[in-house]
Amino acid sequence: MGERYRWKGPSHFDGTPETFGDGLELAPAVRVLREAVIKLREIVPRPPGDPAEELLDALARLTAIEKAVAAERTLLLAEANYHGATWQQMAQACRVRRQSLHKRYVERVTRVIGICSDSSSEKPLRLIMELYPNTFNRLVELGLINPEPSTTDGRPQLVFRRHTHAIALAQQQVSSKNSPEGND
């Protein structure tokens, strides 16, 4: 590849670049985001290959981070609202219009506040189901939990049956992968 086709900007392949070049520093949030993409690659490795394929993989990882950021935003909005922050204050913090923030998040925030106010032992699974539906669906696929319809106080809801045997087996598999004997 000739000089004409050489990428001259900050690159995914630089690890965690700190500048745009010529000493112009990246904003702290951008650096944190780049570090998160790199950390995600370390946690869930992908064999290096064609540069375009690796960049596409980085885009997929960035999408996963965006989904996690949206879930975290929902949780923060719910907690802030619970502690008395108004939708106007939260919109100012998010740098959006109050109506936009309210319209987009009010239903999820209300559900999260309800889940977190509950004393049920199912609270963590309900939060995962609300904030990370793909993770929840994966737990169901793996047979670790089974959501079953039920009625409580005359209202339909899901009850989660945990499959303790399947959970124990999954934990055992993870332990064996992480033990020195399992890494041969």
Image: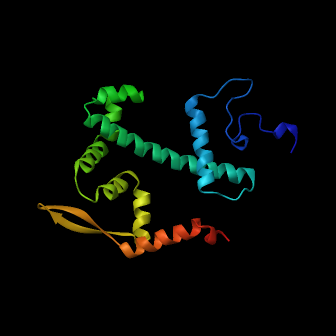
Residue 76 is left or right of residue 174, and the answer is left
Which residue in the rendered view is the most extreme toward the top? Answer: 23
Which residue in the rendered view is the most extreme toward the left? Answer: 154
32 relative to 45, above or below:
above
Residue 164 falls in image quadrant: bottom left
The residue located at (39%, 76%) in the rendering is 165
Query: How many numbered discs, if any?
Result: 0
Residue 71 is left or right of residue 1, and the answer is left
The residue located at (22%, 61%) in the rendering is 157
Residue 103 makes an appearance in the image: no
Q: Position of residue 54 (x, y in %)?
A: 69, 52
The residue located at (60%, 45%) in the rendering is 37
Which residue in the rendered view is the most extreme toward the right? Answer: 2
Q: Position of residue 140 (x, y in %)?
A: 39, 68
Residue 162 falls in image quadrant: bottom left
Residue 146 makes an appearance in the image: yes
145 relative to 119, above or below:
below
Q: Quadrant of the C terminus?
A: bottom right
56, 145: nearer the viewer: 145
Q: Position of residue 2 (x, y in %)?
A: 88, 41
92 relative to 103, above or below:
above
119, 41: nearer the viewer: 119
Q: Quadrant of the N terminus?
A: top right
The residue located at (47%, 68%) in the rendering is 171
Q: Position of residue 143 (x, y in %)?
A: 40, 72
